[in-house]
């Protein structure tokens, strides 16, 4: 791997400014390869060199993978006149280059991945990968057998032929039926348009799974955390649509 300046490395991994990183070095709080006589310009190999700050090892993260429990009322963008999903991240999780991988409508809630890994996001969103996206959808009325069959087999929406989707009844909530719908594609406002075509308006929509990664229900709306390597791997896991 290419080497990197020590102050830049500290800033990126500790989520501090370059100025603060240099202050840490001046105070003698950082060691590299067991040496304390180092400077901000010292070149290190993040994958090979042991770096300690205040006695704690600094693990190297080439990329950030953050799960956010998106609340309603924020937009899936990096910059906007309105509040964005990036505005919800705490300072400890902020980093240059982060973006939402995929979009959820302003009023849609649930699991959102935020990352700075463009290659991973492309693989996750590529239609060829068939990564499943599962949602809880609250509808105005129950789905008929004919309507469900149409969704399971792949309905036609205008000029678009949709891929088969999974659909199953979950529960009734506040007098309205809640279903799980599982897609392997992500067309514009797809779920709302699908049920809108059946004259069955969507009252609420929440994403609960990406690939094999389920929404962490311990996260309150607006909260986020870093994913583990194992959890990142789950996102690209292939599963079978539930068609019950």
Image (tube, rainbow, N blue to C red):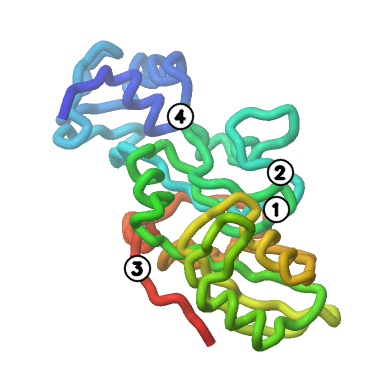
Residue 44 lies, with reference to residue 236, above or below; the image says above
- Residue toward you, 54 or 79: 79
Is disc 3 placed on a helix, strand or loop? loop
Q: Nearer the viewer, mark 3 or mark 4?
A: 3
Point out the tag, 2 or 3, that comes first from the N-terminus: 2
Point 37% across, 33% down: residue: 13
Q: Earlier in the sequence, mark 4 or mark 2?
A: 2
User: Which residue: 58% across, 72% down?
Assistant: 181
Counting from the top left corner in percent of width and height, residue 109 is at: 67, 57
Mark 1 vs 2: CB contact within 8 A: yes
Q: Nearer the viewer, mark 3 or mark 1?
A: 3
Q: Which quadrant of the figure has residue 215?
A: bottom right
- Of all residues, the one furthest to the right in this rendering is 175
Residue that carries the numbered disc 4 in the rendered image:
97
Mark 1 burial class by Cα count in 10 Å: few <14, some 14-19, many 20+: many
Cα gap from disc 3 to disc 1, whole angstroms: 27 Å
Image location of residue 180, percent across then percent down: 60, 75
Front in this rendered view, residue 166 or 93 = 166
Residue at mark 2: 74
Position of 31 relative to 93 (above/below): above
Q: Tag 4, which secondary structure?
A: loop
Query: Marks 1 and 2, Cα distance to the nearest angstrom?
Result: 7 Å
Which residue matches tag 1?
71
Which residue occupies the foreground of this view, 99 or 92? 99
Q: Which residue is mark 3?
A: 238
Mark with earlier residue (3, 4): 4
């Amino acid at each position: 791997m290419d080497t990197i300046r020590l102050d830049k490395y500290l800033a990126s991994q500790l989520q501090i400014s370059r100025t603060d990183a240099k202050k840490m070095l001046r105070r003698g709080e950082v060691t590299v390869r067991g040496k304390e006589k180092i400077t901000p310009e010292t070149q290190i190999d993040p994958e090979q060199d042991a770096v300690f700050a205040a006695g704690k090892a600094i693990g190297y993260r080439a990329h950030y993978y953050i799960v956010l429990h998106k609340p309603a009322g924020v937009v899936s963008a990096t910059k906007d006149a309105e509040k964005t999903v990036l505005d919800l991240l705490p300072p400890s999780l902020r980093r240059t280059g982060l973006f939402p991988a995929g979009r959820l409508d302003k009023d849609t809630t649930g699991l959102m991945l935020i990352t700075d890994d463009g290659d991973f996001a492309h693989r996750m969103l590529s239609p060829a990968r068939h990564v499943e996206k599962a949602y809880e959808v609250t509808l105005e009325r129950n789905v008929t057998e004919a309507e469900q069959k149409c969704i399971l087999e792949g309905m036609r929406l205008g000029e678009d032929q949709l891929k088969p989707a999974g659909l199953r009844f979950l529960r009734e909530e506040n007098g309205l039926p809640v279903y799980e719908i599982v897609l392997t594609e992500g067309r514009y406002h797809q779920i709302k348009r699908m049920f809108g075509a059946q004259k069955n308006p969507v009252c609420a929509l929440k994403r609960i799974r990406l690939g094999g990664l389920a929404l962490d229900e311990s996260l309150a709306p607006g909260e986020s955390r870093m994913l583990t390597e194992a959890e990142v791997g789950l996102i690209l896991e292939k599963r079978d649509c539930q068609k019950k």
